[in-house]
Image (cartoon, rainbow, N blue to C red):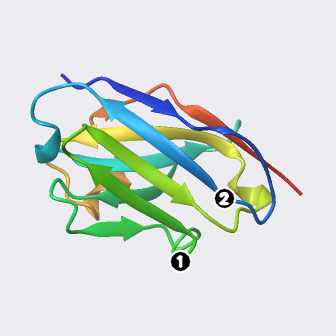
Amino acid sequence: QVQLVESGGGLVQAGGSLRLSCAASGRTFSSYTMAWFRQVPGKEREFVAAISGSGGSTFYAPSVKDRFMIARDNANNKVHLLMNSLKADDTAAYYCAADPTRTVVAAYYGMEYWGKGTLVTVSS
């Protein structure tokens, strides 16, 4: 069982940057693929980025590639999402997720454990 708690959401102007963090419980954090998803009310949850347990592999949705960066700190059981050049379309609730078996590419299809989310609002 993994518990995930996101933080770092807030209001930012278009073109600005924001860093989201996710703190995970559990002793085997480094064995989990971690990912970020986002969801706008009334729409399906959307894959954003994933990172392998070692941090050596990452995968991004085309809409955020070259603007967002996912990173992890296995010593402190955390994963981060650095978001640059934010657009109004990036406004959403952002969710941290973990899975013990998914690859970074397969994370797109869903993860086993989820946080409760943190809201990001980008003003234009």
Q: Secondary structure at mark 2?
A: loop
Q: Is residue 113 left or right of residue 95?
A: left
Toward the bottom, the furthest residue is: 66
Q: Picture coordinates of residue 102 (x, y %)?
A: 19, 52
Along the viewing direction, whichever of 114 and 30 lies nearer the viewer: 30
- Do callouts 2 and 1 mark residues in contact (Cβ within 8 Å)? no
State the CA–CA distance, disc 2 to disc 1.
13 Å
The image quadrant where one finds the C terminus is bottom right
Q: Residue at x 27, y 35 (%)?
A: 112
Q: Secondary structure at mark 1?
A: loop
Image quarter in which the N terminus is found? top left
Q: Earlier in the sequence, mark 2 or mark 1?
A: 2
Q: Nearer the viewer, residue 115 or 79?
A: 79
Q: Residue 27 at x, y = what percent?
A: 10, 29
Question: Can you say whether 2 is above or below 40 in the image?
Answer: above
Residue that mark 1 sits on: 66
48 horizontally vs 100: left or right: right
Please give the count of numbered marks on the rendered protein: 2
In the figure, residue 54 lies in which quadrant? bottom left
Q: Is residue 56 left or right of residue 70?
A: left
Q: Nearer the viewer, mark 2 or mark 1?
A: 2
31 left or right of 46 in image: left
Q: Is residue 109 visible?
A: yes
Residue at label 2?
17
Q: Residues within 10 Å of mark 1 (few under 14, many from 20)?
A: few
Rendering coords of residue 12 (x, y %): 77, 49
Residue 111 visible? The answer is no
Mark 2 neighbour density, 10 Å: few (under 14) some (14–19) many (20 or more): some
> In the image, what residue type sits under mark 1?
Asp
Residue type, numbered disc 2: Ser
